[in-house]
Image: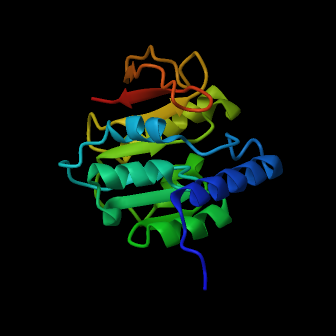
C-alpha cells in the first residue's frame, strides 16, 4: 500500500529536483532551491485576482509561486506558465492540471506565447535568473511582457541581489520594491515594474 504524500516530502523532493537541475544547468536554473513560501506569497500579493485576463508566470520551476497565486484566488485556468525545464513542465502539469503549461524560452516571450495569449494579461510574475543575461536582454523581456499586459499591470520579479535586476530609473517604467523577505533562503527582494 503506497504511503500518502506529505507536504514535507514534496518540499524535499522539490529541493532535490532544483539542486539537480542547477548542477546540470546553473545559468538556466538560477537558484539551488525553490522560492520559499513567504517569497512566493509576497510575489503573488501584487496580483489582483479581481482583474481580468491571464496571469503569465515565467520560470515557475516546481510551482511555489504558482501555488501562492492559486491560494490568492487566481483560477488555474487563468495561469499561463512558461518553463524551460521539461521535467519541471511535467510536474507543473500534474500539480496544476487546468493551467496552460508551455515548455519554452521565457526570454523570447513573444514567440513562446504567440497564439496562446489572446487577451491582455493582468500580470507577469517572473522567477527568471535575470542577472545571467545582459541588460539589453532584460529590458527586451520587460518591454515584451508589458506589450502583452494591460497598461499599469505589474511585472513582478524577485532577486537576491542588493541592486534591482532592471534599473529602477526610467522614463518608460515605474519601479517599486518590497521589503527584504528574510524568511527565504537566501533572503530576497521583490521588484515591481509598471508601464502606464
Quarter of the image with the N terminus in it: bottom right
Q: Is residue 53 above or below residue 4?
A: above
Left or right: where does residue 36 sit relative to residue 105?
left
Q: Residue at x 47, y 35 (%)?
A: 39
Q: Nearer the viewer, residue 41 or 192?
A: 41
Q: Residue at x 53, y 52 (%)?
A: 60
Quarter of the image with the C terminus in it: top left
Left or right: where does residue 132 sit relative to residue 5?
right
Q: Residue at x 51, y 29 (%)?
A: 183
Residue 173 percent across, percent down from the top left: 37, 24
Residue 5 percent across, percent down from the top left: 55, 68
Q: Nearer the viewer, residue 140 or 126?
A: 126
Q: Residue at x 72, y 54 (%)?
A: 16
Q: Nearer the viewer, residue 187 or 135?
A: 187
Left or right: where does residue 192 sit relative to residue 19?
left
Image quadrant of residue 116? bottom left
Amino acid at each position: 500500500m503506497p504511503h500518502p504524500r506529505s507536504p514535507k516530502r514534496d518540499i524535499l523532493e522539490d529541493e532535490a529536483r532544483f539542486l539537480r537541475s542547477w548542477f546540470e544547468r546553473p545559468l538556466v536554473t538560477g537558484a539551488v532551491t525553490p522560492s520559499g513560501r513567504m517569497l512566493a506569497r509576497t510575489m503573488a500579493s501584487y496580483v489582483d485576482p479581481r482583474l481580468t485576463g491571464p496571469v503569465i508566470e515565467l520560470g515557475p520551476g516546481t510551482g511555489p509561486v504558482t501555488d501562492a497565486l492559486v491560494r490568492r484566488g487566481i483560477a488555474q485556468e487563468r495561469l499561463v506558465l512558461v518553463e524551460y525545464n521539461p521535467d519541471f513542465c511535467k510536474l507543473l502539469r500534474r500539480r496544476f492540471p487546468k493551467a496552460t503549461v508551455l515548455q519554452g524560452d521565457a526570454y523570447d516571450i513573444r514567440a513562446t506565447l504567440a497564439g496562446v495569449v489572446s487577451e491582455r494579461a493582468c500580470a507577469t510574475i517572473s522567477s527568471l535568473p535575470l542577472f545571467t543575461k545582459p541588460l539589453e536582454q532584460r529590458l527586451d523581456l520587460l518591454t515584451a511582457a508589458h506589450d502583452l499586459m494591460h497598461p499599469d499591470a505589474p511585472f513582478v520579479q524577485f532577486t537576491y541581489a542588493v541592486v534591482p535586476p532592471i534599473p529602477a530609473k526610467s522614463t518608460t517604467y515605474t519601479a517599486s520594491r518590497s521589503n527584504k523577505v528574510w524568511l527565504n533562503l537566501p533572503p530576497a527582494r521583490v521588484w515591481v515594474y509598471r508601464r502606464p
